[in-house]
Amino acid sequence: MAAAAAAGITIVQSRADGAFVDRGSDAILGSAGSLLAPSALMWWLWVPAMAGWLGYALYQWLPRQRSNPRHERFGWLILASQILAFAWLLTVASGSSGVLLAVAAAQITVGLVAVHSMNLRPPSSSMEGILTDVPLGLSLAAGVLSLVTIIGFLLTRSEADLAGWGGTVWALVGLITVMVGTTMICMTDRGHLSVALAIVWGLCCVAVERLTGAPDSIGIGVGAAVAAFLVLVSAGSRRHQVDHERRRNERRNGGRSQPDPAELASA
């Protein structure tokens, strides 16, 4: 029911111009709201998340999945993410910055708990990973990008200039924070490519908007592109490192991913 409701509001929320959010300069998530505001195309990352959640709703009902203990943990996390996505879409329509800020913070909290759970309980199959881990990763990335966009909008509207550094410097600080935080997440488990790719997509949308839109800023545009590249490299290198270690262990153990318990007992 939650997956169907979230997918339904996504369809209703999509606008005639192909955007989920208002693009105006006075809109909270508008592309002209601040130097950190991405193009409206970024929010299309909700589409694969909703598709994954609909697929999971069917997948976890399969007879062979009813005894899968992983669903007992991840089912609740996915439900919480769906409810928050539903709240995000409704709040964007209402235009309440305070509520949207709280929803984004809650998305990040649930997403970080999900990442910790993924590290402790990896999926048993590729399909399970696609339908559970990927949508949760996309939801976490959407929360991070929403939070940064909202904070940038509020600071720009209030004409805040903390420490007298100027808007460009603080925008660069925001980009560095997103890059470092995402890199830390991607250096765990197998790189969490869904989180990395979603953040890269968002940073690329920021770069394009700052280089071609208004307000324009070559420094922020280039900085966002560099941050996206570094996130992608860190996640890809972590995935390569873990896969290489796994293949080396399989060769060492005669094609088995884990040593034979009998061999360990005899040793």
Image: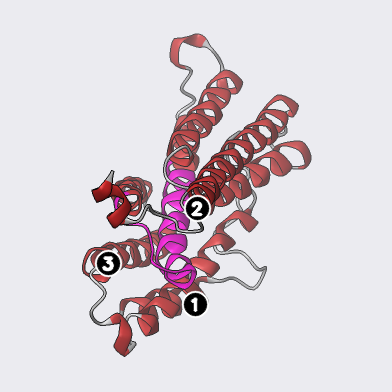
Name the secondary structure under disc 3: helix
Residue indicated by mark 1: 12
Q: Nearer the viewer, residue 204 or 220?
A: 204
Pointer 2 and pointer 1: residues touching (CB < 8 Å)? no
**Disc 3 from disc 1: Cα separation:** 32 Å
Asked if residue 38 shows in the view, the reply is no
Earlier-in-chain disc, 3 versus 2: 3
Pointer 3 and pointer 1: residues touching (CB < 8 Å)? no
| Residue 194, numbered circle | none
Q: What residue do we see at 25% from left, 82% from top?
A: 66
Q: In terms of secondary structure, what is the magenta stretch mainly?
A: helix
Earlier-in-chain disc, 2 versus 1: 1
Residue indicated by mark 3: 70
**Disc 3 from disc 2: Cα separation:** 25 Å
Q: Amino acid at mark 3?
A: Arg
Q: Is residue 158 left or right of residue 171?
A: left
Q: What residue do we see at 56% from left, 42% from top?
A: 235
Asked if residue 7 shows in the view, the reply is yes
The correct choice, above or below, for 246 with respect to 90 in the image is above
Residue indicated by mark 2: 250
Q: Residues within 10 Å of mark 3 (few under 14, many from 20)?
A: some
Q: Which residues are magenta?
A: 120-147
